[in-house]
Image (spheres, coloured by chain):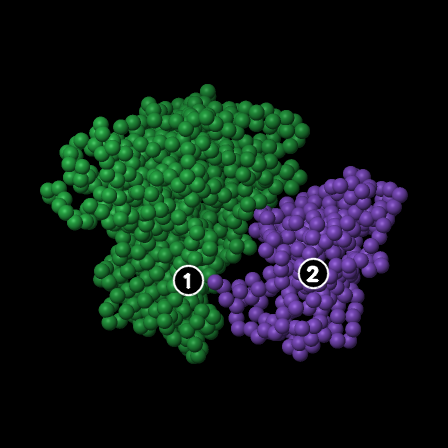
Chain colours: A purple, B green
Amino acid sequence: MQVPAPIEYERATSVAHAIALRSQKGDEARFIAGGHSLLPMMKLRLANPKYLIDINDLEELFYIRENGSEVCIGAMSRHRDLLDSDLLAKHFPIFLDAERVIADPTVRNRGTLGGSLCQADPAEDLSAVCTALDASCVITSSEGQRVVPMHDFHVGPYETAVQDNEMLTEVRIPLRPGGGSAYQKVERRAGDWAVVSAGAAVWIDSGIIVDGRVGLAAVGSNTPSIEPAAEALKGATPSEDLFQRVGEIAANNCSPETDGRGTAAYKTHLVQELTRRALRTAVARSQGQEV
Amino acid sequence: MTTTATTTATDTATDTATTTATDTATASEEETTPDERPIGFGRLLRKEDPRLIRGMGQFVDDVSLPGMLHLAILRSPVAHARIVSIDKSAAEAHPNVVAVITGEDLAAQGLAWMPTLSNDVQAVLATDKVRFQHQEVAFVVATDRYSARDALELIEVDYDWIDPVVDVRSALDQDSPVIRDDLENKADNHIFDWETGDEAATNEVFERADVVVSEEIVYPRVHPAPMGTCGCGANVERVSGQVTLWCTTQAPHAHRTVYALVAGLPEHKIRVIAPDIGGGFGNKVPIYPGYVCAIVASLVIGKPVKWMEDRTENLVSTGFARDYVMKADIAATKDGRILAIRTNVLADHGAFNGVAAPVKYPAGFFGVFTGSYDLEAAHAKMTAVYTNKAPGGVAYACSFRITEAVYLVERIVDCLAYELDMDPAELRLKNFIKPEQFPYETKTGWVYDSGNYEPAMRKAMDMAGYAELRREQVERRARGELMGIGVAFFTEAVGAGPRKDMDILGLGMADGCELRVHPTGKAIVRLSVKTQGQGHETTFAQIVSEEIGIPPEDIEVIHGDTDNTPFGLGTYGSRSTPVSGAAAAMVTRKVRDKAQIIASGMLEVSVADLEWTKGAFSVKGDPSKSVTIQEIAMKAHGAGDLPDGIEGGLEAQICYNPENLTYPFGAYICVVDVDPGTAVVKVRRFIAVDDCGTQINPMIVEGQVHGGLADGVGMALMEIIGFDEDGNCTSSSLMDYLIPTALETPDWETGHTVTPSPHHPIGAKGIGESATVGSPPAIVNAIVDALKPFGVRHADMPLTPSRVWETMQGNHTPPI
């Protein structure tokens, strides 16, 4: 049994309470949601927070709902909730694709969307999903709320825009017509972190891609949104050539490193291959095909 | 599926145990189902499972004694360094810490070093140098586990860095740092040279052969990674001097004797108890420094002390497996007659030679690298070296290096098939040892007891639909798809072993067994071997049941407690059924012989006039006159006279010394699909036809095969204990050391043939490691076959998507 260093622990009873505790304890405190990233790191003593603020009782953060032109997801929504959501399946099948290959059912029963984004692991799948969907993050403090787009949310590996007196409370995804999305992941084994993942989302009107985005995981110190890929997709007509070209753009705009999961050359190849596949499926789905 | 699968005659071995006894049954045709509760052999749900699946197992970590203290070990952060100083004062000042012990403290008691199972020595706690990352440096004993762990961080150690030896290929270079400067006159990192076979004869064959194919084949370092990590609870009673050790050991008796020999503890005062131990796979054969530390701590402090390693400690410091770099050559005629195989092996044994192998076999049973083929000549050379890595070597269901040997031969035969453009199944069929050649002595001196290879191979091919698969492959290749079909055929050598040849640290490898039948006809059988999940409590009850007719549920199997079982060397190398299984049959026959004499008194006929049907003796020609074994048991313990010269009671004890090893074999076929775009390998099908001789419980046999096949998928596709250039272990958690899940493994298709062992009392051979041995080459051969359009002849494990893709690009590199 691996045992963490001594900690103090408190269960927050509301978002306001959680933020108050966090403000009081500062950078020696961590929120604990599902705990599937933080607890292993604590057991390995790679993370040694002095205080844990447990936010699992914050029922106000468990929701997935349509709100006008957005889908709003409470930060404490579990992977399992995302996987089971008809609303997400209908509008953003990329969630279904990704959640099926995130960890295993035990982890998915506990791990949360907010925890995944805040862990800010460069290999985290939901960050790539949210990037592809052009999501934004609602960050709450005692002063109120601010909304940060995904591309500003991660400021470095394991670092986010959330300050010591703040908390990620909601993720918002714009609802637009003609949308289609998909996720592709290569892993060495079910439940492993991605060797490379690629998510893609497109919005198509009259056969033209009005907007399209690619989100990648595990290919650099941060989860990049590939702006040149978005530029290439905008206004283009879907075709295998386009998917190939955007795949190449994605491959040229990431910086994977050689490690136990694979060589940099292989990962670069995968970015191209998986981006192409994700785009192909996303386009098919936007046209109502079941894929 | 029409033929019958059971070979239940108790005296198979003494009459028809030749290859002609082989049938070609498959696994789905058993005559009994678990519901029918066979008396003797047959499918039977495992007796141990209700306990284990209800969470009522008793594991070492469940042992808790009043006042028990907890021990944690400080490990080296670096692979090679001189210890300059250790400051333990802050740790000692921790309020919950009872003691902090360093190597220097142990050295003062003469306990800083201990012998390994290969007659090397290993540091219990480092005194002079650390020789691998995570080596044991000091330990803390505290009132709870958390405090012990916390206090480790308060110990200050000053290390003076030395360049580590990480690359096995450069370990013997002139300028390589000497790791084992603790050994007298040691000026290099050489451990041993070993060879087998006839070098001159082999070279002569190679010179005249039409075709010679050479390949460097690497079997990387892997880890057993049992679900339960290693640990112990030690209790030294100061007044009586009694030492009780609850320990994760696969070999309780061997451990007890080694403690007696090493520490000078009187052996009758040492009791080793191995309760449920949570898996082993060879990982729990060695004696680890942690066990010694716990005993010393209990001795010094006078209280019981528990040490349980965590997952990281298990992966980084306990017995690994493999780590062989094998240069292989195969010689053949141009029409595919294999003439000879030779190999030159570089073996990485880590910082201490910790392999558990019989003394005369430093390379284990690697000599069976000639495989299942009738060769003209064979020769192997091996050099073993020290490196700055964790010690070990024999673990992970390796059958004493047979895993490496089988991988070598099955890979190089496939390389030959590639060069000859021959079907790999046909090439094997052409070269098998023929049934009439058994017992067959190989060119390296191993005497295969029995075998009938072609039917097993044909059966696997039939189950696979081999010809159809090859047709499908042609079609898929034409479409640019990558489908591979891998074939492997293995022969194992298990059941060590005959005491004339085999011992561990001087302890002969024969096994005792004791059987008592109680007055009411219930029985208790006591064994030296130790289950780690293989189902001994069921299998051994069935062996006794088969021989004496008492239902298995009426037979208690006692094992894992040295005070309550006869001496024997434990469970590893698939030896339990070949050795202790034979002992159980023989001791039961001894009891049955006595029962027959008692029955003759009860029925008032001569012994010769009695015949045995399972569970009862009856008078020949008058079956109405009979007595059951239960009635005989009561008579043996009851009132009234027994036949002249017969003592009361119904029990016996024996020690079984195997005449030879047993040689199980099998034919495996694997079908894979490789995604041409991502290089991800999907194991589509796996067909395993095993022959382990007589099957005692076919359900358990299948379970053993399933587990071993999953092992094989792990090793072939994802498992490796890796090191960076500084000797840091890069596989220190289960996030980095991957073990396959149900999603990576197909539905196994198993079948079997039955070729009994001629020398084993019930004709049984070991099955525990067959699938682990046989499956990696089948999977690798399948992947290499899938990559044939890229001109790939060989690729090393683990075949992760990245390694497969690099191979497709022509950039294959060995993993070490």
Horizontally, is B446 left or right of B772 in the view? left
Q: Which residue is mark 2?
A: A77
Where's residue B554, x and y in %?
Answer: 33, 47
**x, y percent for residue A154:** 72, 62
Asked whether the viewer can see residue A223, the reply is no
**Residue B396 versus residue B443: which sits nearer the camera?**
B396
Q: Amino acid at mark 2?
A: Ser
To which quarter of the image does residue A156 belong? bottom right
Q: Residue at x 49, y 51 (%)?
A: B721
Q: Secondary structure at mark 1?
A: helix
In the depicted structure, whether residue B634 falls above or below residue A44 = above
Which secondary structure lies at badge 2?
Answer: loop
The residue positioned 27% from the left and 53% from the top of the image is B565
Residue B155: percent from the left, percent from the top?
A: 44, 72
For the point 15% across and 36% down, the residue is: B604
Find residue A169 and report its horizontal and vertical position in percent.
73, 66
Q: Residue at x 75, y 59 (%)?
A: A64
Chain ID at mark 1: B
- On screen, residue A267 versus residue B74, left or right, reads right
Q: Is residue B509 left or right of residue B603?
A: right
Comparing A94 with B790, the one in front is A94
User: Height in image: A97 above or below B125?
Assistant: above
Report, in whole angstroms, how far the alpha carbon at label 2 lies from the one at label 1.
36 Å
Instruction: Identify the residue under disc 1.
Output: B61
Residue A127, by quadrant, is bottom right
Residue nearer the viewer, A168 or B515? B515
The 10 Å Cα crowd at callout 2, few under 14, some 14 to 19, many 20 or more, is: many
